[in-house]
Image (cartoon, rainbow, N blue to C red):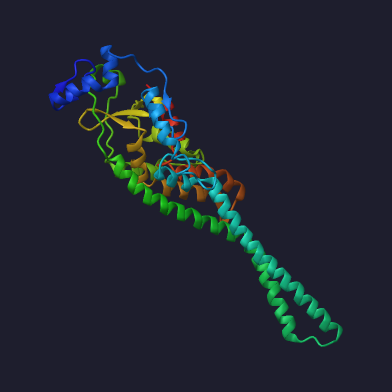
Amino acid sequence: MNNCEHCNTIFKTEAALNNHKNKAKYCLVIQGKIEPVEEILKCNICEKKLSTKQNLEAHKKKCIGKKDQFKCEFCNKILSTKRNLESHLICCLEKKDKVLKELQEKELKELNKLKELIEIKDKEIKELLKLNKVKDKDLIEKDKIIIKLNTQNENCKEYFEKQEENYKEQLSDLQNKLDKIANKAIDRPTTVVSNTTTNNNLNIMSSIDFNDLENIKYLIENKLNVNHVVDGQKGIAQFLVDSFLKDEEGNLLYKCTDPSRSIFKYKNSEGEINKDIEAKKLISLIVDGGIKGKSVEIAREWYTDEGVIDLEKYKIMDSPQQLILSIEGENSGFRRELSSMTAV
């Protein structure tokens, strides 16, 4: 092993070590060869971070041409990649409102046609009554139409609710497909930094096993409650800190060392300090552990009483549920809360 004498990073070969000492910006800052970058240079189109103003300007010229390439047709939000656009479409409230509005308009058109038919039948029957020529079959036909109208009016609200549930199930299926793609990227190895001073300052006493799926399934099934779910992504962060990210003495096993970049550190089973950038490993674990399905189950139990949906409770729970279901894509609320609760 070859150890960098400036930043203590370990490399397998001397060539890799030399390349690191000559090119790694954070190491060059430690060596005093370059000045640290105080300002964050970010593209205002795709939010990509660049190291220098020159690189930022060059990037912007390429990015401007792609500005409208990944634009949401429902809310006009611009996404940097096709995958980010697909993740955004899952939880786009404007898209959901448009679909529901179209369903409502279609149903109202059908109801109006039915009302017009009843008015025509009423006129026909009145004319027949005047002539004393009304027949039983005409009255029966009218009754059938009236019963159909009344039934449809009574079930209209239930119909809309079922349509919304079907819509959410379709979104969930799409999200599951995206999960499989995202998980492949999450599994790539992260660089292990052996900085003795920094690691000691973290004071992480015990390890976290991200392969222990049975444990996280048990915690989700038995510890997740409606108070967590109604707070959306923030509530999920609170649940993890309370039930999974602390040891028996209440000491944190998972700590945020860089809130601006959402970098978290933990100790693996071999006693090494590893990084979890943007909490991707943690998010992947709870998704595999069934956090989505359990949160939906808890939410439905809360806003449903003997098979009847309480619309006020449903409205309260709808937005938090959407945030939990899209936690792999849009998870800034989760990461902010987790950073705040685990910051060193």
Q: Is residue 232 left or right of residue 146?
A: left
Q: Residue at x 27, y 17 (%)?
A: 28
Q: Horizontal and vertical percent for residue 193?
A: 24, 25
Give the vertical position of 221 relative to 202 (above or below): below
Q: Quadrant of the N terminus?
A: top left
Q: Is residue 274 left or right of residue 162?
A: left
User: Which quadrant would residue 291 be assigned to in this image?
Assistant: top left
Give the vertical position of 178 relative to 209 (above or below): below
In-front residue for pair 328/86: 86
User: Which quadrant would residue 243 be assigned to in this image?
Assistant: top left
In-front residue for pair 102/206: 102
Whether residue 118 is visible here, answered yes or no, is yes
In-front residue for pair 241/7: 7
Q: Horizontal and vertical percent for residue 176?
A: 38, 51
Q: Residue at x 59, y 57 (%)?
A: 102
Q: Residue at x 14, y 22 (%)?
A: 2
- Toward the right, the furthest residue is 130
Whether residue 307 is visible here, answered yes or no, is no
Q: Horizontal and vertical percent for residue 68?
A: 48, 42
Q: Residue at x 82, y 84 (%)?
A: 128
Q: Horizontal and vertical percent for residue 231?
A: 50, 38
- Toward the top, the furthest residue is 32
Q: Is residue 141 left or right of residue 171?
A: right
